[in-house]
Amino acid sequence: MSLPQLDPEFCRRRQRRLLQIMQEDGVGRAIVTRPENVQYLTGFRPHHLMNAMVALDADGTCTLVAPNQEPDQAEVDRCLTYEAQKLCTLRQDQALAAAAKLEGSFGRFSQPGSIAVDFAAHDSLVRNALELKRDKSVTDVEPDLLRLRRKKDPDELAMIRHAIECTEAMYARAREIIEPGVSELRVFNELQAAAVETAGEMLLATGNDYQCASPGGPPRKDAAAKDGDLYILDLGPCYRGYFADNCRTFAVNRKPTDAQQSAWEAIVGVLDVVEKTVKPGVSAKQLFYDAREKLDAWKKGAFFHHLGHGIGLYPHEAPHLNSHWDDGFQEGDVFTAEPGLYSEELQAGIRLEQDYLVTADGVERLTRFALEL
């Protein structure tokens, strides 16, 4: 069975969307360096230890600067390469080398009136490497790309759905092996194996939280689950650059206490509100406040983190279900909702998380596996 990958036609559509913004802003060339943005536009994602760059000119010409050799799949008009390694040793000045290759090619193309660069990650490095002098008109294209990336295309949704399938396999294995005495490292290792088997290849990430009787954290040496504990697993497989993010909580002995069960019911009630409330235009900030009010009814202050966030080419994207942002939901958003409750009587806490696609009139839930403790 073939594995999901980005579709060349949708890559071209994404390039055209950026071109439209460039034309409106009078930008002659956009240069992107962040791996998420390179992949979004071309379908090519460099190895995480290597740099790549893309230049999109106002005439529609898309140029990729790739490490070492031309990739097998990249929807571009021309591809340049630079030496990212010397005798297999990684260079630490790759960004400079890639930028020099791109800068050296500019003379062959029409010169733009202004340049836009995704400066968010490393403003001064990119500006200096590309020799973008202060007398040139240089703007930041990162906010535009982040806005474009919110609306997921069908090929992107296929990547996210496959990442979610990996999570489903991980939780199925967790239900088989979690019991009193199981070590955190065994849980971690077996869940990694389940995800990779389902993905059909090595994954870029598989999530952060593998600790028992704890709100979260990496697996600990010699730590084991105990009778009565709750085991929070917050898993986020990253398949070819696209993230899932799903959390489940397990009663280690499969016999939740009355307090644990009532907390679970309160959290599920918040997820029900999310599914009934969210549609384009709804305030993510207000949804956070509404959820916190409902969870405070169980125990005030027992919910202390965000309600959720967008996912895609980065684990935390817009919309932010968070009091520190004021986002509205948009059609095409893919987001998580992850309400939780934490207290000593719960023996750590419970967090449950679902992934959703915002549709024209509501949401489609993308996670379809069990929530039960």
Image: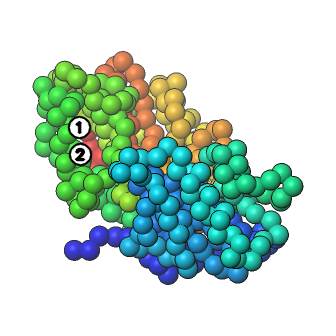
Residue 37 showing in the rendered view: no
Please identify the quarter of the rendering in which residue 233 is found: top left
Element under disc 2: helix
Q: Seen from this angle, which residue lies furthest right?
A: 135
Q: Quadrant of the N terminus?
A: bottom left
State the residue at coordinates (31%, 53%): 203
Residue 186: % across, % down: 16, 34
Element under disc 1: helix
Residue 219: % across, % down: 28, 30
Residue 199: % across, % down: 26, 59
What amino acid is labelled 1 in the image? Phe
Question: For mark 1, what is the residue?
Answer: 188
Pick whichever, 237 or 175, lies toward us. 237
In contact (CB < 8 Å): disc 2 and disc 1: yes
Q: Seen from this angle, which residue lies furthest front?
A: 87
What amino acid is labelled 2 in the image? Gln
Distance, label 2 to label 1, CA atoms, is: 6 Å
Pick whichever, 29 or 334, lies toward us. 29
Q: Is residue 64 above or below residue 128?
A: below
Q: Residues within 10 Å of mark 2 (few under 14, many from 20)?
A: many
State the residue at coordinates (56%, 54%): 97
Residue 250: % across, % down: 25, 36
**Residue 192: image tag:** 2
Q: Residues within 10 Å of mark 1 (few under 14, many from 20)?
A: many
